[in-house]
Image (cartoon, rainbow, N blue to C red):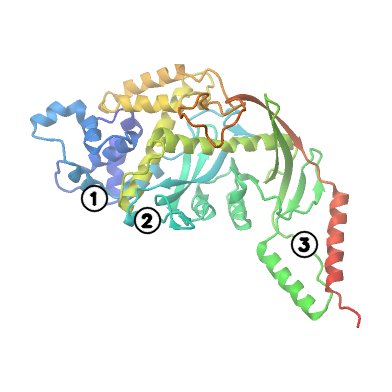
């Protein structure tokens, strides 16, 4: 059986252990053993556009002669489907947990900030096969006319920003919220991490739970979140406290009761939550044609010392959260294929396939990180994901005994095939300059397809006097509105 460098990352001994722990190991001899089934499912994710017969033929082509002499024949599609059902999703989930990790790279500026490992979590939707069973198990998006599109599963991953390796992952139904899935991967957080998150993940409960893991946090928060200024720091950031929504609810009910009784409102609620440091920044992006876009970012962090973590550096570090989006693109576009749903029409097989995709992605990122180590402090982002994927596909027929030497050659080759020029300061670098369609698009633009962009970041310092005056004015208005009118 082949497997190539994929078998180096997922060794047969670990596969047998996962099968034994989950009770999926076969007690009698079969022409399709469970170990072969595991590598077959992984190969299905590696060759997402190939048929069952083509994938199994690639997997055993290195030993086709010996297997044919022993009377073994290529199995039918029905036999391979039954093999997948016998395996289930449990062995692949266990394999992913055993193989997941942070990074195999050195401590470098592109992987760490302020002495902390940069990690981020984010969510995405994965299209499942359009079957009644998947629709009932996972759910699907809705529109004005009812259900729409394929059934989808919500996936949340915790990823290392430098290496883009997945530290942990959780997925559920389409209706499962990202915050609920993030709570499942909280045990993966540890001291020495700096967790980046978008504003959709912020909640008082999740913030406190993540802070309890002793990992540092740098999250974007909503613009209307009440964060009173307690002390302005020299770099323009300020200290504040989070407010427990339960306390706010009780205070609102108390204020309503006093208003109904004609009494004066209670004093403003003093926040009793954890202390946070707030950074407000305005980022302006200008392109070659003179177009400018401005965005306001409001960040909350547990790094309270401005000397070790200046506000401008914190705002710039938040941009590395985009590693999650890049990882999703590599999984859903370069590995699975554009606009392609998972194969399995059965929910259990669909979960199995999703875990397998995460394992194969981990294997490719592992190869990229090992190739980066062959260079002198080489950043893994400079090595092409598609080049590593193609190298794994080409080596699928190699047996595990000679795969180690072949893997070493792949590492050296990938370290030489670098992205010669970064395009992080350009807009739409891959946009087609000449469309293939004869009719103009409704969203056609006269702007150049790709332009250089410059970024300007400015820290907004809060005005304490104006903030206090506005707060006192709002308090006086509420008090006047609740006073009883004279007869």
Q: Are marks 2 and 1 in contact (CB under 8 Å)?
A: no
Q: In this image, 232 relative to 132: left or right? A: right
Where is residue 181? Give x, y as percent: 49, 53
Q: Residues within 10 Å of mark 2 (few under 14, many from 20)?
A: many
- For the C terminus, the image quarter is bottom right
Where is residue 389? Give x, y as percent: 38, 28
Q: Measure how far apart labels 3 and 1 are at the Cα level.
A: 58 Å
Residue at left offset 56%, top offset 41%: 120
Residue at left offset 27%, top offset 23%: 402
The residue beneath circle 1 is: 86
The residue beneath circle 2 is: 135
Q: Quadrant of residue 395?
A: top left
Q: Residues within 10 Å of mark 3 (few under 14, many from 20)?
A: few
Residue at left offset 44%, top offset 28%: 385
SS assignment at label 2: helix
Residue at left offset 33%, top offset 47%: 352
Dot in front, 2 or 3: 2
Sequence-wise first label, 2 or 1: 1
- For the N terminus, the image quarter is top left
Q: Is residue 32 above or below residue 457?
A: below
Q: Check residue 270 in the rendering and tell me which mark sits there, or answer none.
A: 3
SS assignment at label 3: loop
């Amino acid at each position: 059986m082949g497997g190539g460098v994929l078998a180096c990352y997922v060794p047969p001994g670990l596969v047998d252990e996962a099968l034994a722990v989950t009770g999926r190991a076969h007690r009698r001899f079969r022409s399709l053993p469970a170990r072969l089934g595991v590598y077959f499912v992984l190969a299905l994710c590696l060759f997402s556009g190939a048929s069952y017969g083509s994938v199994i033929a690639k997997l055993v082509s290195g030993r086709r002669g010996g297997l044919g002499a022993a009377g073994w024949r290529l199995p039918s599609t029905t036999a391979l489907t039954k093999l997948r059902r016998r395996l289930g999703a449990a062995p692949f989930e266990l394999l992913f947990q055993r193989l997941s990790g942070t990074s195999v790279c050195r401590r470098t500026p592109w992987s760490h900030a302020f002495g902390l490992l940069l990690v981020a979590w984010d969510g995405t939707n994965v299209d499942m096969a359009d079957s009644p069973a998947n629709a009932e198990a996972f759910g699907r998006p809705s529109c004005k006319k009812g259900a729409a599109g394929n059934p989808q599963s919500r996936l949340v991953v915790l990823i290392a920003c430098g290496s883009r390796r997945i530290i942990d992952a959780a997925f559920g139904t389409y209706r499962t919220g990202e915050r609920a899935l993030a709570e499942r991967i909280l045990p993966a957080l540890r001291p020495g991490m700096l967790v980046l998150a978008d504003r959709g993940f912020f909640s008082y409960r999740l913030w406190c739970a993540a802070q309890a893991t002793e990992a540092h946090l740098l999250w974007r928060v909503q613009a209307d979140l009440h964060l009173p200024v307690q002390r302005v720091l020299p770099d323009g950031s300020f200290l504040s406290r989070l407010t427990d929504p339960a306390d706010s609810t009780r205070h609102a009910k108390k204020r309503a009761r006093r208003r109904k009784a004609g009494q004066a409102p209670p004093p403003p609620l003093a926040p009793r939550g954890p202390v946070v440091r707030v950074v407000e920044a305005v980022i302006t992006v200008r392109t070659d044609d003179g177009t400018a876009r401005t965005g306001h970012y409001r960040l909350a962090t547990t790094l309270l010392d401005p000397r070790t973590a200046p506000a401008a550096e914190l705002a710039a570090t938040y941009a590395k959260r985009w590693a999650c989006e890049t990882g999703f693109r590599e999984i859903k576009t370069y590995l699975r294929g554009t606009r392609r749903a998972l194969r399995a029409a059965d929910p259990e097989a669909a979960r199995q396939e999703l875990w397998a995709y995460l394992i194969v992605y981990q294997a490719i990122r592992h190869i990229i990180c090992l190739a980066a180590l062959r260079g002198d402090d080489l950043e893994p982002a400079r090595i092409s994901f598609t080049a590593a994927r193609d190298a794994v596909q080409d080596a699928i027929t190699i047996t595990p005994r000679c795969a180690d030497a072949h893997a070493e050659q792949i590492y050296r080759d990938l370290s030489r095939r670098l992205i010669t020029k970064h395009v992080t300061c350009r807009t739409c670098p891959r946009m087609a300059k000449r469309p293939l369609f004869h009719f103009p698009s409704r969203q056609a633009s006269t702007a150049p397809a790709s332009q250089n962009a410059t970024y300007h970041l400015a820290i907004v310092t809060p005005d304490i006097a104006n903030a206090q005056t506005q707060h006192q004015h709002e308090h006086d208005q509420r008090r006047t509105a609740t006073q009883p009118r004279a007869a």
